Image (cartoon, rainbow, N blue to C red):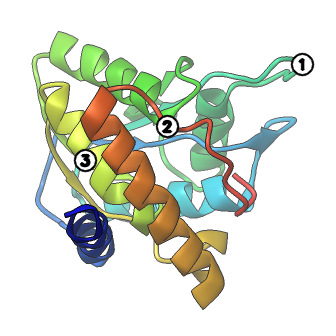
Amino acid sequence: MAILLVGGTAFRVWQVARITDLDHANAIAVLGAAQYTGVPSSVFAARLDQAAALYNAGIAPTIVTVGGKQEGDLYTEAASGKAYLMDQGIPGDSIVALETGSDTLGSIDSIADYLIGQGTTDVVVVSDPWHSLRARTMARDAGLNAWTAPTRTGPAVYTRESQLHGIIRETFALLWYQATHSSADQLSYTAEQ
């Protein structure tokens, strides 16, 4: 039974990672990742580039960046993401920076609070492919009509090893979330979050 549960979940993580839903929405939400003195890490930059491409394709009129800061940081993930997107030519008034959240669940809750407060629930969530199913599950549990358009670039997809690591990690993180409704983001992630 345990093998079927883990295997089935891993298959769903892999399956949803391959889906890019380009339905129109009210917002594109970019889940944060590490930033270094205001400069997004390669993982975060790949997510932001995907969000910019979706915005430029007319998928949604607003991009929401999310993420707080670690102890000692000068910038939040959300603020550095907004600055990066503005450097890519996205108008600042089309970007909302939610400077809270230190894990996926906290970030999703912040996005849901903001969007529901704005009277909408339609959102495209951008993250790494392997993270998509868990992020979408959490977003739907938070009351959002969410689908995903994961990045296809960055360290999370460069090698078969990083892909396998991502699938394994997200399989167990999703199972943990489904069992406890709490975050499993304390598990280490080696693709330079």
Q: Residue placed farthest to the bottom in the image? A: 160
Residue at which label 2 appears? 184
Q: In the structure shown, which secondary structural element does the residue marked by tag 3 occupy?
A: helix
Give left or right: position of 164 versus 110: right
- Residue that appears at 23% across and 58% down: 58
Kind of residue at badge 1: Gly
Say which label, 1 or 3, has the lower sequence index. Answer: 1
Compared with residue 183, is residue 21 higher up or lower down, i.e. above or below?
Answer: below
Say which label, 2 or 1, has the lower sequence index. Answer: 1
Q: How far apart are marks 1 and 3 (CA)?
A: 30 Å
**What is the quadrant of the N terminus in the image?**
bottom left
- Residue that appears at 26% across and 23% down: 112
Q: In the structure shown, which secondary structural element does the residue marked by tag 2 occupy?
A: loop
Crowd tier of the residue under label 3, counting other residues whose Cα lies within 10 Å: few below 14, some 14–19, many 20 or above: many
Say which label, 2 or 3, has the lower sequence index. Answer: 3
Location of residue 110 in the rendering, given as x and y in whole percent from the top left corner: 38, 19
Q: Residue placed farthest to the top in the image? A: 117
Camera-side residue: 16 or 127? 16
Location of residue 133 in the rendering, given as x and y in whole percent from the top left corner: 28, 56
- Residue that appears at 16% across and 31% down: 141
Residue at which label 1 appears? 72
- Residue that appears at 45% across and 69% down: 167
Q: How far apart are marks 2 and 1 (CA)?
A: 23 Å
Camera-side residue: 181 or 141? 181
Q: Cβ–Cβ below 8 Å for labels 2 and 1?
A: no
Closer to the eye: label 2 or 1: 2
Q: In the structure shown, which secondary structural element does the residue marked by tag 1 occupy?
A: loop
Residue at which label 3 appears? 136
Crowd tier of the residue under label 1, counting other residues whose Cα lies within 10 Å: few below 14, some 14–19, many 20 or above: few
Query: Which image quarter: residue 148?
Result: bottom left
**Which disc, if any, is residue 24?**
none
Camera-side residue: 191 or 84? 191
